[in-house]
Each structure stands twice: as C-alpha cells, then as structure tokens.
Image: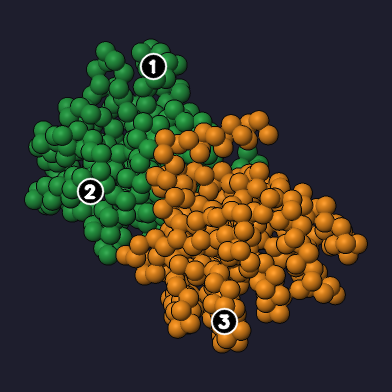
Chain colours: A orange, B green
C-alpha cells in the first residue's frame, strides 16, 4: 500500500497541504457562472459582488481551496478568469485557489498571471485524452503546479472501476515522463449517477481504493452527481461522500454551504481517527448551532 | 479475499438469509427491558403489550430479525425469555429471532424450547473468553444455530484492530473444532465510544475489513455506542454506520425506529450496488413520506 502523498497548493500568502493523513480539504465549487443567472448578469456588467460574497462565505463554511471557473458564454474567458481571480484574492486575502477551465488558452493565461512569488494553484483539469495530456501537462510542469486528472480518455468515461484505474495510471505515468511527481496529481474518478447506472457508487469506491492503494495520490470528485434524479438527494449524497472518504477521498469539490455534506465530511474525518478528541466535530457543531 | 458467507436464521415458518451479497439485514434491538421502565413494569405484571407492539413496529420499520432480551432484575430469566419469545412469535406470525442473554442457562432453556421443526435462531452471544467459549459453543453445535461472537477475551475488550481480529479468529477456530461452520458465526468487533477513545471508529473499520477479507463472515455491531457523549449523535452514528457497511457490516443491531439510521443503511446498500435500480431506496423514501 502506497503512503499518502501531500499536494501543496499555494497562493503568494497562504499554503495548503492536502493529505489524507490530516483529513478532508473541501474545494469550494460556487465561483462558477454555469447555471447561475444572477452571477452571469453581474459578470456581464463587470460586477463581482456575488463572486466576492461567495468566496468569503465558502471559506467561512469550511472550504480549504476555492475553485474558480469563468465559463460565461460569449465572454473573453482568459481575461474574465484573471479578473475573477484578482477579485477573489482581494476579497479573501489571497486564499489558495483552483483554476478551472476546459480551455487550454484560459489555463495558460491564468497560470502566467497567477504563478508569481511561489504561488502554485491547483489546475482543474487534465484527462487521459491524448489531446488534453499533450496540451495541459506541459503547462503544469512549466508552472510547477498541481492538477486534477479526470479518469476519462479517448474512449470517453469508462463504465468499470478497472478502466478508471487504468486512466489514472496513464495520467500519473505521462506526468512522470515530464518530471511532474505523483503528489501533484489529484485524481477524479468521475462520478456517474445512480439513477442511470446503478453500480455507479461501487465503481467509484472500488476505483478510489485501488488508485489510493497503488499510488497514494489525493482524490477529488464532484460527489453530488451520484444522486441526480433520485429522491432524498441530500442524504444520498452525504452518505456516499462519507463512504468515499473511507475509500480514500481527500479533497471533494462541493458546495460547502450545503451543511449536510460538510457534516458528512467532518463525521468521516472523526470516524477515520483524524480528529483528535473530536475537537473539529464539536467546534463544527457549535458553529452550526450559532449560525 | 474470502467469499461472502450466508448465515441462515429460521423460525418454524420463515427463513432469513443474511449476506453482504444482497444487502444489510437489521437486527431490531428494542425488545429489551434494560433501561425501559414501562416495559419492565409491564413484564413484572405479566403483560406483553409493549413487547408485541415493539415487535410489529420494528418489522414495519425494516427489521429482518428481532433481538429478544429478557434481562429483568429479579425475574426468572429463562422462564421470562420463553414467555417473551412466545408473545413475539404470536404477534409476528413467527418472525426470525435472535435470543440474547449473557446467561448460559437462559440460552439453554430458550434453545431447548425454540429449536423445533427446523427453527434456528441467532444467539447473542459468545466471546473469546475461555469460559464463554466452553459454555456457549456446545449449545450452538447441539441446536445447529448461529451465534454472534464478540471480539473480547480473557483480557477484556481490546484497544487495537489487530487484537479484535485475533479474537474473531479464535472464536471461528474454536467453533470449527466442534464442527460449527464459519457461516454460523456473526462477528461483533465491539464499538467503543469516540468520546473516550478517539480512534474507536478506525479500529472498527480496520478490524471489520480484515475479518471480512480473511473469513467472509457476517458482521454485526451496536453502532450507536460510537457517538456516546458527543454532540449531534444522530448524524455521527448514521455516517459511521454507512462507512461500516462499506467495510463489511452486514447485520447491525439497532433501533429501526430511528429513521436516520435506516436511511443510512439503505443509502449504503444503494451505493454498494446492492439495490438494483434504486428500488429499495425509492420505496423506502415513499414509505417514510407517507408515515
């Protein structure tokens, strides 16, 4: 069994060490205009009030990293990404971030702007697709940062745990060829929905456990997809997340304003023996009572 | 990795097959006068209204086996146990049961009364203590039933996963010497409380996973002990239970009237790929909405 690796995510002012050894780190997903009409309208007017509020609120709710996505249809995405990053840094005294775009040019512009004075963001994301590996990994190497590797490839999203493992291994190997260490790869097994793929949960648990056993890398996922189309989504997602932590999930990307998910992650850390004396659990409970 | 074993628990009329392959079976814990003043008072008056109501209500809430404990201070326990069993059989059309007593004479009397026409209860419990092994296992062999094996021994309740595994192995070996197969042993790792033993959760997860890997036996536990003395017990217990199912828990002993625990177990079965099409999840959600 591989030792737990540590992924270091840094802004100029702050450093976060992501590792299963000390517990779960939440990547806050809210700074993303996709499907958010008010945020879209604000961004079109050059306003960032909601971005700034969401940044501060997510940190207060327990986020350890802020994901930033600038996917606004019709916008100049590289320029908008840099603007949003700047606003988030200002609102949060330079909190660690994750730069999130499917477009290589956006990642390149944002990294070139951000990676100064030791700042090393997490990048979201590369996959095992030949084109993405070729475009994104050299940027990760050039800027010395870390990257989320999605377990999909030229054949799309796999339907087995085995092939998810193969894609994770391929990303880690291709990164290694460029001199990027495994600790800078955070694997996302890709969560399908139980509503259409009733073995989706087991597929994730099995692939995560095997990837962690073999490589010790950190694991992220957008867990809420598991419950899409099912009743009582809140409970189903939360129990799934706790079970995934048991299997090796270390830095879920989620909305920390959803209290039940945060409670699930805190409970999982406590059960896994990473919350000495239950102090985080007790403190979290009191904070929610007073909120 | 050992294959999942099946423990068969039978009344004269009904058969239950406990196995991880098909999902969690709840052992309902409510028929127990310990700490229940109203039930104690009724039993002293020779009334069984609450026993009968609890039996029916637990089955409606999802219990697959009913635990029956007759531990009433000052009572003739063997006689009371037989009376309660008779009442439960009558109220539930002979639902499968678990006969629960620390006293060998009570177990012996109850088994002698109950084990006719193919009825095979689960027995709660034996441990790895020399005296218990010597007294209880021959009864299990004689009556051809199954038994819960507690991971404690002459040295008390162990503080490590390793020693829990050793005690489980010892019980399974001693049973085998008498010709009792491993499928008739249900292991209880013994859950300590996080409030006083902050690695209690990890200890259980690690021991369960190792015992299941090695022997494939069914696993029970009184999970709620994990949260004793902690705030937000309901959530902590429920998330712990879901994580334990991931590790191998198959037949928790709990109160099925606690809805959050039942939801946790259903979610865990769904996530583990044991609820095809999510039908049990959807049905359970609708039943709770209509309750």
Name the residue beneath numbered marker 2. B162
Left or right for A149, reference B74: right
* Callouts 1 and 2 in the same chain: yes
Proximity of marks 2 and 3: CB atoms separated by less than 8 Å = no
Left or right for A140, reference B138: right
Q: In what element is the residue under mark 1?
A: helix
Residue at point 64%, 44% (across, down): A61
Name the residue beneath numbered marker 3. A138
| Residue B40, numbered label | 1
| Residue B181, numbered label | none
Q: In what element is the residue under mark 2?
A: helix
How far apart, in angstroms, are the residues tagged by discs 2 and 3? 46 Å
In which quadrant is the N terminus of chain B drawn? bottom left
The location of residue A146, given as percent across then percent down, is 54, 69
Label 1: how many Cα within 10 Å (few below 14, some 14–19, many 20+) = many
The location of residue B85, given as percent across then percent down, is 33, 31
Left or right for B265, reference B77: right
């Amino acid at each position: 069994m591989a030792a737990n690796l540590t992924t270091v995510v840094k802004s100029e002012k702050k450093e976060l060490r992501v590792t299963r050894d000390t517990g779960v780190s939440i990547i806050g997903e809210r700074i993303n205009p996709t499907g958010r009409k008010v945020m879209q309208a604000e961004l079109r007017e050059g306003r960032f009030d909601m971005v700034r509020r969401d940044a501060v609120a997510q940190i207060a709710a327990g986020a350890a990293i802020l994901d930033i996505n600038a996917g606004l249809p019709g916008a100049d995405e590289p320029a908008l990404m840099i603007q949003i990053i700047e606003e988030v840094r200002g609102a949060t005294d330079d909190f660690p971030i994750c730069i999130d775009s499917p477009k290589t040019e956006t990642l390149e512009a944002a990294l070139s702007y951000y990676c100064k004075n030791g700042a090393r963001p997490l990048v979201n994301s590369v996959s095992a697709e030949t084109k993405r590996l070729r475009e994104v990994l050299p940027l990760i190497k050039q800027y010395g940062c870390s990257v989320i590797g999605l377990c999909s490839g030229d054949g799309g999203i796999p339907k087995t745990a085995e092939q998810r493992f193969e894609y994770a291994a391929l990303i880690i190997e291709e990164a290694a060829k460029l001199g990027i260490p495994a600790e800078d790869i955070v694997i996302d097994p890709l969560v399908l929905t139980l509503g259409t793929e009733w073995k989706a949960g087991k597929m994730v648990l099995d692939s995560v456990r095997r990837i962690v056993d073999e490589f010790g890398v950190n694991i992220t996922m957008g867990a809420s997809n598991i419950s899409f189309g099912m009743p009582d989504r809140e409970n189903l997602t939360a129990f799934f997340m706790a079970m995934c932590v048991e299997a090796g999930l270390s830095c879920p990307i989620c909305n920390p304003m959803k209290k039940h998910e945060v409670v699930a992650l805190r409970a999982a850390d406590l059960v896994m023996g990473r919350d000495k004396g239950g102090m985080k659990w007790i403190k979290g409970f009191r904070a929610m009572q007073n909120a």
